[in-house]
Image: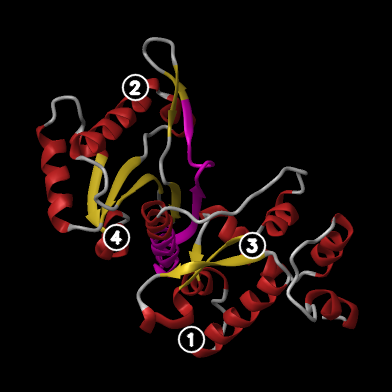
Amino acid sequence: MSTESARVLQPDKRRRRIDRDELRRISEAMPERDREVLHRIDEHRYLTTHQIQSFVFTAHGSTDSAARTTRYVLARLERLALIRALPRRVGGVRAGSAARIWQLAPAGARLLRDEGQAYRSHEPSLRFLQHCLAVADVHLGLRDLTGLETVETIGVATEPNSWRRFVGTGGEQRLLQPDLASIVRTRDYVDRWFIEVDLGTESLPTVLKKCGQYESYRASGIEQDAHHAFPLVIWVFTSQTRAEKVKSSILRSPRLTPDLYRVVTADRFTTSAQEWLQ
């Protein structure tokens, strides 16, 4: 990093307001890794320090080295007023700095999007925050599949890029909103998955209604026309009991196609995904 770049990216005091020219200078001097940190936070809305480390800082010789570098980069981006930490943490006091939760600050959003739009960060509800972090964990679980010898590439789309628009049977415009949409390419196949992450906050009828939305989208034929097959719908639950109830309800429902769905708990997601790819 040049001396000028270092000066721009190492302010003497915490920044609060950044004008357009200063933001441009910061953007021009910013290392690509720092920009990737911003992109990762942006795509998931909220990420813990540990999740950011797992997404971005993966080429270090040890976990301790990766953790130190992650904390250093996040502290710099916070001083630049590009990101900010939420008051609450996850995992309790003992979780330490790895449990800090980060979101984009307005300047960070402007740097990425350059749309001239107002952006306000805010304190999310605990329910929404927990869901965002759980979806990010599943995303990381998908990335772990790259360790399989047969897996060549993995593509993951987060909201809203994972959404699908289609026309219902009555001619109405409809929107399907998966938490994630994934494409896993192996030597011999391409596996496509829509992924729903459920923390037990929705009622069972609501979950089954969402399954019905997938059935309606499948009936539209859009995915089949584009890819010659419809993706599997993966439901990820935190509770084994709830997973079993949903699985049983799908099997009993005359409106649903059981072979379209896979039901798994979060702690078994990566292991189960490996089995689905075999």
* Residue drawn 52% across the image and 41% down it: 160
- Residue 62 visible here: no
Q: Which residue is mark 3?
A: 38
Question: For residue 219, which numbered disc appears in the image?
Answer: 2
Q: Is residue 139 magenta?
A: yes
Q: Image point 12% across, 46% down: which residue?
A: 245
**Which quadrant of the view contains residue 141?**
bottom left
Q: Secondary structure at mark 2?
A: helix
- Under circle 4, the secondary element is helix
Cβ atoms under marks 4 and 1 closer than 8 Å: no
Q: Nearer the viewer, mark 3 or mark 1?
A: 3
Name which of mark 3 and mark 4 comes first in the sequence.
3
Q: Amino acid at mark 3?
A: Leu
Q: Which residues are magenta?
A: 136-165
Question: Are circles 3 and 1 on residues that touch, CB within 8 Å?
Answer: no
Q: Is residue 132 something that shows in the picture?
A: yes
Residue density around tag 2, few if under 14, some if 14–19, many if 20 or more, within 10 Å: some
Disc ID at residue 269: 4
- Kindly identify which residue carries mark 1: 63
